[in-house]
Amino acid sequence: MAERVLVVDDEMQITRVLRAALSAQGYDVRTANEPEEALRLVEDWMPDLIITDLMMPGMTGVELARVVRAKSDIPILVLSVRDQERTKIEALDAGADDYVTKPFSTQELLARVRAHLRRAPERNTDVAIEVGDFVVDTAAHSVTVSGRPIHLTPKEFDLLLHFARNAGKVITHRALLTAVWGAQSAQQPEYLRVFVGQLRKKLQGETAKEYIQTEPWVGYRFLPEGAPE
């Protein structure tokens, strides 16, 4: 079956262009011109990926991402104009996985779509990783820290998985961005600021352990047994 992509944008010209481009690549595409319609399609049609604009009348793309993420791990890619930096960060905080800045290259957008759809089945090819306080089960898409289950979004899971596979090593910003979001994202460090911050909070929980250390100007180091704060 063709993978399903839902495009949400109040500009009909954009939905027509994206529908044509994605359909030409073999995707099953549906469009919605308002978030409320998109939520109905998420319930009834179950897309494999959502592409949504940020600024729409009524419910914004940020609010849409938050509602979808509360009930589903569907990858969410947001479209934004160049001067919406704060809103892009809010979208990532709300559960979006990626963004593309308008005006965008269709080929770049298609590359990001392929990357997000490709990574989900790849997780199932690995056995569980047990390292330090962590069990990262790629087949079940589950994580426990000292026996405590942790709920992660798809991108948070991908980030932790890369950390777990490289425990104790310093991983550069560029290497993390390329591994988790693809080479086209290597110059967008705001991804890491948001997602590492979210991941730290979830992993630490009520403990005093620090699992992700910042290496200033270089990157991050994952310490699976934790370090006291």
Image: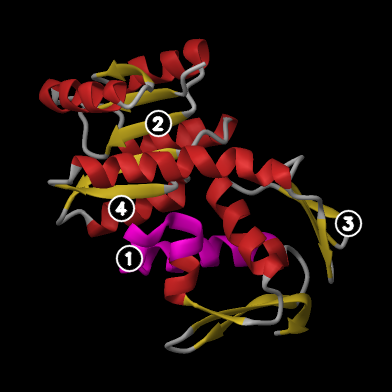
Residue 164 vertical placement versus 135 (above, below): below
Q: CA distance from mark 2 to mark 3?
A: 33 Å
Dot placed on the residue nearer the N-terminal end, 3 or 4: 4
Dot placed on the residue nearer the N-terminal end, 2 or 3: 2
The tag on residue 88 is 4
Location of the C terminus (image quadrant)? bottom right
Mark 3 packing: few (<14 Cα in 10 Å), some, or many (20+)?
few
Residue at image location 44% in from the left, 64% down from the top: 178
Q: Residue furthest front?
A: 25
| Residue 222, image x, y percentages | 66, 76
Q: CA distance from mark 2 to mark 1?
A: 21 Å
The tag on residue 188 is 1
Q: CA distance from mark 4 to mark 1?
A: 12 Å
Q: CA distance from mark 3 to mark 4?
A: 34 Å
| Residue 69, image x, y percentages | 52, 36
Q: CA distance from mark 3 to mark 1?
A: 34 Å
Residue at image location 57% in from the left, 45% down from the top: 154
Residue 32 vertical placement versus 136 (above, below): above
| Residue 149, image x, y percentages | 80, 50
Q: Nearer the viewer, residue 174 or 93?
A: 174
Secondary element under disc 1, as helix, strand or loop, is loop
Question: In this image, 15 relative to 117: left or right?
Answer: left
Quadrant hosting residue 223:
bottom right
Q: Which residues are magenta?
A: 178-202
Secondary element under disc 4, as helix, strand or loop, is helix
The tag on residue 207 is none
The tag on residue 147 is 3
Identity of the amino acid at label 1?
Answer: Gln
Secondary element under disc 3, as helix, strand or loop, is loop
Dot placed on the residue nearer the N-terminal end, 4 or 1: 4
Question: In this image, 95 relative to 55: left or right?
Answer: right
